[in-house]
Image: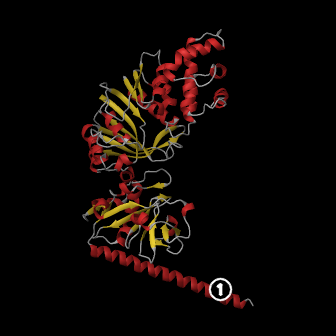
Amino acid sequence: MTQEIELALNALYLRQITTREQLIREALRVAMTRASATAEMGVDELFSIMKFGTESKLGHFRADREDFYAIYMALSDIDLFDFVSAVCENDREGHSAVPHLLTEYVCTRIAQRAPKSVLVPEAERVFSGLRSIIAASDGTVTITTQNNLFFQLLQFLFRDDPNISVRMLSIYMLLPMPEQYDYIFCLPAFGGKVSQECAEFLTRDYDGVALENLMKLLSEHGTLDFIAPAKITFASGGYDLLRKSVLDRYWVEQLMILPEGTFRPWTAIKTYLLSISSDSHDAVQVGELAAHKGTLEPSKWRTLTVEEFAGHGDWRIELLLSDDDENLRRFRESPTPKVKLREIADVFRGKSILKKDTAMGDIAVLNISDIEDGEIDYDHMDAITEDERKVKRYELQEGDVVLSCRGTAPKTAVFSQQGFQVIASANIIVLRLKGGFIPGYVRLFLESPVGSTMLQSFQRGSGLMNLSPADLLELEISALPEAEQSQIANHYEEEKKRYKDAIAQAEQRIHDEKEQLFERMI
């Protein structure tokens, strides 16, 4: 951010113009006024032009003419695009934006494909890189937004460019656009849902609806580069049908994990670059992108045939990249039947409890810190005071398998009934087995190399672990006969007891030896 922009922002802050929307609106108001003004005009004339020329589009100016003149002078020599870019880049209100590295990658993709028509929906999310994207394209560029202020801003900025079209529409509902495009880049909204009435779509989430919509706008030789959250690669609830629709109607060109923290501070969720093409491809590239000398480049990848990629069912890159792992290969090729957790267990998350709410209560709370080396410390758990009926749904029962869903690494244990009520905290996922499976066996499977890799593949967050109960329903487990499961679980417990006994004996022996040596020193 330049010093001139900082000074202009301070002039706006002094007049209680502080939010992203307010800052952009008043900067646009000044630019629109300046476009109709002359250098000789004074305060009264400028204020009059502003009133008649901007308020019908931008709303009433909520200050006097002296305030407007001060703002006008502070912004008079500043490029509107640069100012809005600085505001967007420094916004902390939760509006996600495409970082510079990713913009440069997109520009490289455009330059390689030389599309005649480019579509950039949700343009406010890529605002800082719009100039670069437009410059990389030799054809027409269509920009869309569902934000009225950005629609006015984009129309003003590109009013004199015949190759740029600005449209106001939402990519989260049925699109009226009949046009098709050679290249589309989109960072959709994460987390929102469309209304129940939108039954036309395979999913109800904004990201799924956006992907489904935009695929239909690809030209005969078009490419869609779509920023996808982790759930798109493995979740059910319509996402399985969406993945199938992609494979049935289009071609996946690449699926790459974006670097950790790409969209911080707006979100820390794990994101992927999904590239879909109308043109047929013989292979699919899967892997990871990493920053290298100011650019994004593949740092770890594999090339799969289209048949190999489609044969995996879901698109969990972690598993695709781990195909050379002997344990995972053996698991996939083993004739042992496999079942998903949804078939054998009820899966739910514990109750959200603030630290300040813990007290000397009679309801114990299981937290991540209470699980260590596959065992639960029942003696030092926090407690709360609460109506038992309100926490009944979170109460742990004998044989529940508990799994940490936050933190740096998964922890697992099997709950044993206590003489007091114990509930799970929100950092714990509970697997309540329906029958036919031994809790100790399921816990061991989750800790196995195969289980750990599979858990990692369901990771939604980047950096710290973030697992969802709904996602874990899709995790597969070997369905050995119950008797064999019991043998495995019991054998492990016996060996663990021998190990702990050996440790205890060794500790006692070194203690006794030290005592004898101390006696010799006297």
**Horizontal side, residue 163 vs residue 48: left or right:** left
Label 1 is placed on what type of residue? Lys
Way the structure is coloured: secondary structure
Residue 431 sits in quarter: bottom left
Q: Position of residue 381 (x, y in %)?
A: 52, 70
- Relative height, residue 490 to residue 41 (above, below): below
Q: Which of 316 and 358 is in front in this view?
A: 358
**Horizontal side, residue 336 vs residue 360: left or right:** left
**In the image, what residue occupies the spot 34% across and 50% down?**
235
Q: Is residue 448 visible?
A: no
Q: Where is residue 306 in the image (x, y as percent from the top left)?
A: 28, 43
- Relative height, residue 351 to residue 224 (above, below): below
Q: Is residue 62 visible?
A: yes
Q: Mark 1 points at which residue?
A: 514
**Horizontal side, residue 41 vs residue 223: left or right:** right
Q: Where is residue 157 in the image (x, y as percent from the top left)?
A: 50, 20
Taking the view exactly as shown, the residue that stands out farthest to the right is: 522
Label 1: few (<14), some (14–19) or many (≥20) C-alpha neighbours in 10 Å: few
**In the image, what residue occupies the spot 40% across and 78% down?**
493
**SS for tag 1?**
helix
Q: Position of residue 132 (x, y in %)?
A: 49, 27
**In the image, what residue occupies the spot 52% across and 75% down?**
379
Q: Nearer the viewer, residue 89 or 243?
A: 89
The image quadrant where one finds the N terminus is top right
**In the image, what residue occupies the spot 59% across and 11% down?**
37
